[in-house]
Amino acid sequence: MPPLPARLSLFLELGFRKVNAPMASDVVTRFAPSPTGYLHIGGARTALFNWLYARGRGGKFLLRIEDTDRERSTPEATEAILKGLTWLGLDWDGEVVSQFARKARHAEVAHEMLARGTAYRCFSTPQEIAAFRAEAEARGSYAVFQSPWRDADPATWPDAPFAIRMKAPRMGETVIDDKVQGRVVIRNETLDDMIVLRSDNTPTYMLAVVVDDHDMGVTHVIRGDDHLNNAARQQMVYDAMGWAVPVWAHIPLIHGPDGKKLSKRHGATGLEEYQAMGYPAAGMRNYLTRLGWAHGDMEVFTSAEAMKVFTLEGIGRAPARLDFKKLENTCGHHVAMTEDAALLHELTGYLAAAGRPALTAVQRDRILAAMAALKERAKTFPELLEKAKFALIDRPVAPDEKAAAALDAVSRGILKSLTPRLQNVSWTKDSLETILNEIAAQNGIGFGKLAAPLRAALAGCSVTPSVYDMMLAIGRDETIARLADAAA
RNA sequence: GGCCCGUUCGUCUAUCGGUUAGGACACCAGGUUUUCAACCUGGGAAGAGGGGUUCGACUCCCCUACGGGCUGCCA
């Protein structure tokens, strides 16, 4: 079932490619979400890229929760994010870092900048700044705010709260050498002296990310391209502190099917919703990896395979749209290639996530027995369950409309004559096939005519695995009992 | 308003100056079939528009259009 060409070419490539000696890698990436809600599908992809990049190079993948916004951060959101990443199969190294917990260190760095002369005390109040902007806007201009305190004489400092502002270069340009976007040049005059420490001594995001990334040893910053402009200002902080600038990679955001920024009105935006919809994690990872990244014609692959060829340069620069049809197709390949036991385990997780009843022992046994047949005809767990209906129900089987129609008097007669002959036949696909074909021939009908009532009696519906597979999965006694029920 | 990024079939993408612009999903037609799914064969389908540079541009440069982002004592 896996498309041979893609897997074959990957195989050849891995086989023939000169293998770089896997030295101890010092790659460190991180995912740094804000705990203000569920894990967004776009964020999940960002995390996935970071994970793939680090894991593919023997590096570390760290997790940091950016919870400095006390108003909007909640522990529930943090919990949801960790659960989402865990479901997707993205494991992180070490403890989860709380940005809020590091605020003392952030303040320390801000003061060090002060000492180095790369930052200054700004006594302008938020009201003054707002007034400045309002006035500029009224004039139709949008000049950046220039604090009057940038070069003020300490003797003139009032005894009042102050914010610490970065003393950004006013001339020249800042160059972001981005692995995805290329060389991005930003003129320094378009950037203001951003605040790094608020007047209440809390750090701003711009300072906190840089300090944390530096302290955590992050070497590659892979994040959404909504941060591309921010990178220029953050790079100034690295420079101000004399720290090594990480490798930047700003990836495009994911859009909805209509090409607009992904929002609630597009339907599912939270990763947890995808789990509840029954997409397998491996398929989700495959689809998300291919969304905005490509390696030749490689389409269906495991994450282990992706790691071997994943590069930042392979990431596209244009935003990609979500396509549920392709997601489903990709998931179908993964359902089919997953081990039966693993699939059953994940199915159990799906049931819980979707709030559906758990399987009984009998149901588990039957589904496991039929898994080989089930998994090649289902793309998602709900679909698999629909086709596994015969394994979930108990006698007497209540036929739906279509099934009832297949159980006419003639068919019931055939079923009745069939049951004794199933008593002693060996319960294997081959012998069942032989005997059923025999019976069809004896009744002068094609196998299809026999399969319909059989299917109706066994499953009570018309969408099922093959009749042989069902018989094998539920066993001889249950099969005969169901056929007898229907024939009566 | 300013600055930054982007634009190849409907969608995800390949191509890194010379190809009949390739693959996948979706779609259409046919085949196979035990329902569904799968599978097989075939088909239609693309370089936003306009200028350059070049012997030759999807590919390099400029302009326009459209989409997105940033422009906070949010992250």
Image (cartoon, coloured by chain):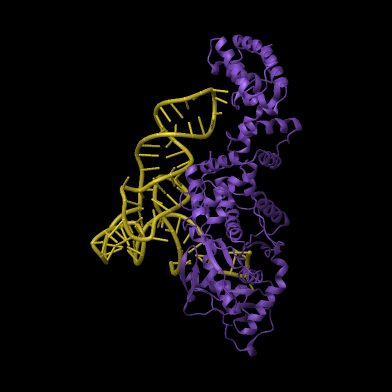
Residue A95 horizontal/vertical position (percent): 72, 62
Q: Which chain is purple?
A: A
Q: Position of residue A355 (x, y in %)?
A: 70, 39
Q: Is residue A479 above or below residue A314?
A: above
Query: Is A414 drawn above or below residue B65 in the view shown?
Result: above
Residue A429 or A37: which is nearer the viewer? A429
Taking the image as drawn, is residue A451 in sight? yes
Q: Nearer the viewer, residue A263 or A211?
A: A211
> Residue at horizontal 65%, vertical 21%?
A458
Q: Horizontally, is B9 left or right of A313 in the view?
A: left
Query: Does residue A13 sit above or below A197 in this rendering?
Result: above
Relative vertical location of residue A462 with respect to residue A297 in this rendering, above or below: above
Chain coloured yellow = B
Location of the C terminus of chain A by quadrant is top right
Image spot of residue A377 (x, y percent): 57, 33
Residue located 48% across and 71% down the image: A142
- Asked whether, in this view, residue A127 is left or right of residue A138, the answer is right
Q: Is residue A268 visible?
A: no
Is A45 in front, or is A372? A372
- Left or right relative to A42: residue A366: right
**Res A451 → quadrant:** top right
Percent x, y of residue A239: 57, 78
Q: What residue is at 70 percent from the left and 64 percent from the top? A: A97
